[in-house]
Image: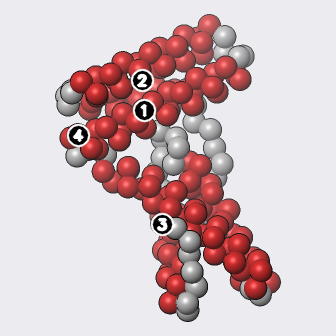
Amino acid sequence: MALKEKTDSVLQIKEAVKNLLDVANENKSMSISLSMGLVRTYLKDLLALYEDEPEATFKIDGLKVSVENASIILEQKLYHECNLYGDLVELRRFAKSMYHDVYDVFSQKVDNGTNEEILTWAEYVKFSLIMYSQSKHIVFSLSEDDENMIKRITMDLKAFKELGGIIYE
């Protein structure tokens, strides 16, 4: 499994956000401008704290979350208003949907599956939870191994449904 639990560094976030702001700057509307202002404010606060108090990791982590959340909202606005970042927005949605579907099947397998099925679906839950968690970060991408695992999970979800399994929406 290539996806691993990770935390992006302040410099990685800064670079990703600067690229996002550059794109947003070319596609301004009122809501995009407001979101850009929020992202800039959070980024400025994060960089100032990182510069002044690099040992304040708890505060830095909190500001990183604020920067990333505001940046993802800006990404979504750029998608809806300018048709940009569509692949990334859809990948984030897919990560959430896949996690819920996989967890739902796993819950059913715990009640009436074999040990092998339970272990397989537990592995899928772990992978999809990590992917969903990482989708909430501004720096989010998949490796070839990740894409192969997604194909495997998708095929097993499809097979589960074809055998009469129910995935609750």
Can the viewer see residue 125? Answer: yes
Mark 4 lies on a secondary structure that is helix
Q: Is residue 120 above or below residue 32?
A: below
The residue drawn where x is 45% and y is 60% is 94
Task: Answer left or right for 92 relative to 82.
Answer: right
In the image, residue 158 lies at what x, y percent? 49, 82
In the image, residue 37 lies at what x, y percent? 36, 18
To which residue does mark 4 refer?
81
- The mark nearer the N terminus, 2 or 1, is 2
Amino acid on which the number 4 mark rests in the picture: Glu
Check contact, mark 1 vs mark 3: CB within 8 A: no
To which residue does mark 2 refer?
39
- The mark nearer the N terminus, 4 or 3, is 4
Report how far apart the C-alphas of labels 3 and 2 lie in the structure: 30 Å
Amino acid on which the number 1 mark rests in the picture: Ser
Mark 2 lies on a secondary structure that is helix
To which residue does mark 3 refer?
147
> What mark, if any, has residue 71 been given in the picture?
1
